[in-house]
């Protein structure tokens, strides 16, 4: 008997999502209307821990979490458009956003509301269809208008006060991923995307 005839296909266990959120939070994260279609992300303090490293030549260095980046990609796959609006501009941030393949971003925005509105108009969305995550006062105009607002664990007290949800994770350490996971679960897309990854890993997907 040949060795190949003894080979067996791996047994793939049925996997249910391990992550869960309270039902009342999932209801809020669906938004007040027909569902959320876009999510706005701050950078410093959300996609990073808020610290800025400045080199001898004046260049910025920032640390990003891969968990957050993959979450933003999943968000797009789930039908929710990721939008990045940051008050600072640097090659590091532009490189990170480009690497993630995110087409909607505004850098060096002094007025985040003024920066966001043309993007929403372009996408044909109103504020009830938008979620936002921010950590400091410049994010407040977006958060008080958004259909769902979120703040990282270390956000300023005034930002936490207007947020529908404060993440267990801090900015730069998975807060954005928690935000993405919550939105995807509320939209009924989380389990589908998880199972799609399992199919890709075992070779039965594409």
Image (cartoon, rainbow, N blue to C red):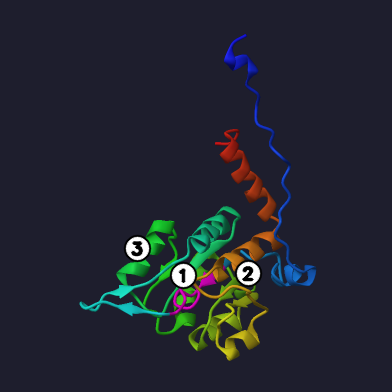
Q: Say which residue appears at 66% left-offset and 65% top-offset.
A: 182
| Residue 185 rendering spot, x and y as whole percentages | 69, 60
Q: Specify whether 123 is left or right of 94.
A: right
Report the magenta stretch's main SS: loop
Q: Are marks 3 and 2 in contact (CB under 8 Å)?
A: no
Q: Residue 37 appears in which quarter of the rendering?
A: bottom right
Of all residues, the one furthest to the bottom in this rendering is 158
Q: Are marks 1 and 3 in contact (CB under 8 Å)?
A: no
Q: Specify whether 133 is left or right of 165.
A: left
Residue under label 3: 95
Q: Nearer the viewer, residue 115 or 204?
A: 204
Mark 3 or mark 2: name the one nearer the start of the chain: 3
Q: CA distance from mark 3 to mark 2?
A: 28 Å
Q: Is residue 169 above or below residue 11?
A: below
Q: Residue 108 appears in which quarter of the rendering?
A: bottom left
Residue under label 1: 84
Q: CA distance from mark 1 to mark 3?
A: 13 Å
Q: Nearer the viewer, residue 136 or 132?
A: 136
Tell me the quarter of the image containing the C terminus. top right
Mark identifier at residue 129: 2
What segment carries the magenta color? 39-50
| Residue 138 rendering spot, x and y as whole percentages | 48, 86
Q: Which one is in front in this view, the residue at disc 3 or the one at disc 2? A: 3
Residue 55 visible here:
yes
Q: Nearer the viewer, residue 171 or 131?
A: 171
Q: Are marks 2 and 1 in contact (CB under 8 Å)?
A: no
**Residue 10 is one of the magenta-drawn residues:** no
Q: Is residue 159 above or below residue 96?
A: below
| Residue 9 rendering spot, x and y as whole percentages | 65, 27
């Amino acid at each position: 008997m040949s060795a190949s005839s003894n080979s067996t296909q791996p047994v793939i266990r049925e996997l249910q999502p391990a992550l869960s959120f309270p039902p009342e939070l999932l209801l809020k994260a669906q938004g007040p209307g027909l569902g959320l279609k876009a999510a706005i992300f701050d950078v410093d303090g959300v996609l990073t821990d808020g610290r800025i490293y400045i080199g001898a030549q004046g260049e910025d260095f920032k640390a990003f979490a891969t968990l957050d980046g993959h979450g933003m990609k999943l968000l797009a796959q789930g039908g929710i458009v990721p939008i990045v609006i940051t008050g600072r501009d640097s090659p590091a941030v532009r490189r990170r956003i480009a690497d993630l393949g995110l087409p909607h971003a505004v850098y060096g925005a002094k007025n985040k509301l003024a920066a966001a509105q043309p993007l929403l108009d372009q996408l044909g969305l109103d504020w009830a269809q938008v979620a936002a995550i921010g950590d400091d006062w410049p994010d407040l105009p977006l958060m008080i208008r958004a259909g769902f607002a979120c703040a990282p664990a270390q956000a300023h007290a005034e930002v936490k006060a207007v947020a529908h949800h404060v993440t267990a994770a801090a900015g730069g350490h998975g807060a954005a991923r928690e935000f993405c996971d919550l939105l995807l679960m509320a939209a009924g897309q989380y389990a589908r995307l998880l199972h799609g990854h399992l199919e890709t890993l075992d070779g039965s997907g594409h």
